[in-house]
Structure formats: C-alpha cells, structure tokens
Image: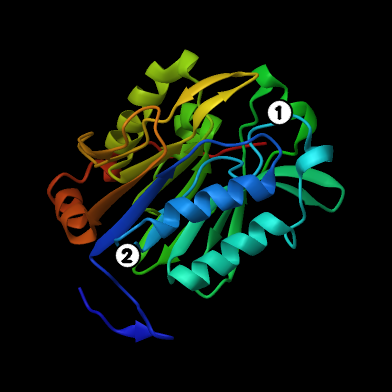
Amino acid sequence: MNSDTINGQPSTVDALKILLVQHDVVLGDIDANLHKIDNLLNSCTQKADIIILTEMFSTGFSMKPELFAEPVSGKAVTWLRNKAKTLDSAIVASVMTADSGKYYNRAFFVYPDGKYEYYDKRHLFSYGGENNRFTAGKSRLTIEYLGWKICPLICYDLRFPVWSRNVHNYDLLIYMASWPNARQKVWNILPVARAMENQCYVATVNRIGSDRTGDYSGESKVVNQFGETLAQSAPDVECLTFCEISLSKLFAERAEFPFLNDADVFCLKD
C-alpha cells in the first residue's frame, strides 16, 4: 500500500501496530491512574500506531459520576491529548465524562495531533445501575486512520452483535472494558465471535485488580477474522502487549471469502 503523507503522517499503512495497556485502576484517583499509566508507557520500547486503554481508565467503573466525572477540558482528556502528541500515536480510552448536565461513558479516539472524536456507550449495564446514572449514546462511530476504518465500542456493547455488525464500514473493532472474572468466559468467547462474524480484527483491553464490584484479570487480546488469537496479555498483571495486524491480508481474505456480502439487512430503532 502507498505511504503518501498527510501533515507528516502516512496516509495509509498496511501493518498497523497496536499497543494494549492492561492496567489496574485506583477508584476515583485520577492523578494516581494517570501517573501509573505514564510509567507503563514510559517503559515501552516499541512505537505504536494506536494505544488502547481500558473503560473509565482514569477513575475506575463507578456509579457516582457526580463525584468523578470530568468535562472534556478536565485532566483525563487533557492528558490523552498531550500523551498522543508526545508519543506521536493515536490513543483510545473510555472516560467518565460530564457534558451539558449529563454523564456519559465516553470513548475518545485521540489523534497524534491532539484532535479527537468520541463515541458514547450505547448499551449501559443495567445490572449494575449504569443506565440510571449515565445517558446512552445513539450512534456508532467509525474512525478513518492510516487507511484503516476503526470502530471503538465499550465493554457491555460486546454482548450485542447487532450493534457490532460490520456493514462494510470497519476493519478493526475495539472494546475497552472493566469486565469482571465472574463473567470471564463471556469475555474470552465473544471477541472471537465478533471477529469471525464481522470479518475483522478485534482488539480488547480489560483492567486488572479488584474493587467493590469484583475482581478483574485482564486477559486483553487481539483476534483476527478467523478467530485466531494474535496476541494476548498475561492475566492479573499490569503489562503492555504489542501486536501488528495487516490490512492487505484482511482484504485478500475478504475477497476470497466474501461472507459480508450475504449478511442480512436490518435497521436499528431507538
């Protein structure tokens, strides 16, 4: 694929370099969490095109947004924008966000120049009361970056295949999560299903550690369109996991096995 540049960045790369940041989270302590992830990223010896953090990476998953949520001008998003510039990488992370009197579980895709786009979590975890404290998103987001089409989703969205359905509009599906051990089997199985049914790569990042809602073992990974695991983080440890995925290989396999052309047509309603 070509390597023309736009504003100093390649317009297209075939081999996309992904870095999964599997980390613990100190509930409500934004400064401690940013410091922790700074240290992890400072230890990285490989350049990544995209760095992926966890769900509510700066605060932990909490049903007290009135205490912990920040506006987009707050510490977490400011840190994401500065870090993306410093590392010359895109960064994807979910942030507990306050916006116009409402609270959102919001995924930010921050470009290397600090600009960003965002997606608000569609499926709020009613079992834990998230739907009572946060406002659900209404639309999916597709990012175009380095010649790749990327769809960022959040945690509980993983359970809903219709929302995740690929209608020829993405190559990489990302899930940021706080997925507890009690439902770890689901976390291990569904990314494989999403990758195979959508003929795409799937990257998942889950936190580790414990809080009042349970224990988390991480097991972040990257899966290809055949359901094969390309890279996986060790359980229960803070770590960086690097993976390289190929766009030309994905396109070649879609051309040979054009399953998406036979998919059902449907329309989502609120």
| Three-letter code, disc 2 | Lys
| Percent of width and height locating residue 16 | 28, 61
Which of the two residues, 71 or 211, is positioned nearer the viewer here? 211
Q: Secondary structure at mark 2?
A: loop
Horizontal side, residue 125 vs residue 178: left or right = right
Quadrant where the C terminus is found in the figure: top right
Q: Secondary structure at mark 1?
A: helix
Residue at the farthest left position:
256
Which of the two residues, 14 or 230, is positioned nearer the viewer here? 230
User: What residue does disc 1 label?
Assistant: 130
Instruction: Check disc 2: other Cα within 10 Å, few if <14, some if 14-19, many if 20+.
Output: some
Horizontal side, residue 112 vs residue 12: left or right = right
* Mark 1 / mark 2, whichever is N-terminal: 2
User: What residue does disc 2 label?
Assistant: 47
Instruction: Check disc 1: other Cα within 10 Å, few if <14, some if 14-19, many if 20+.
Output: many
Is 127 above or below relative to 232?
Answer: above
Q: CA distance from mark 1 to mark 2?
A: 36 Å
Which of the two residues, 2 or 258, is positioned nearer the viewer here? 2
| Percent of width and height locating residue 261 | 28, 45
Question: What's the residue at 16%, 53% (across, down)?
Answer: 255
Quadrant where the N terminus is found in the figure: bottom left
Q: Are marks 1 and 2 in contact (CB under 8 Å)?
A: no
Mark 1 vs mark 2, foreground winner is 2
Is 109 above or below relative to 52?
Answer: below
Q: Quadrant of residue 63?
A: top right
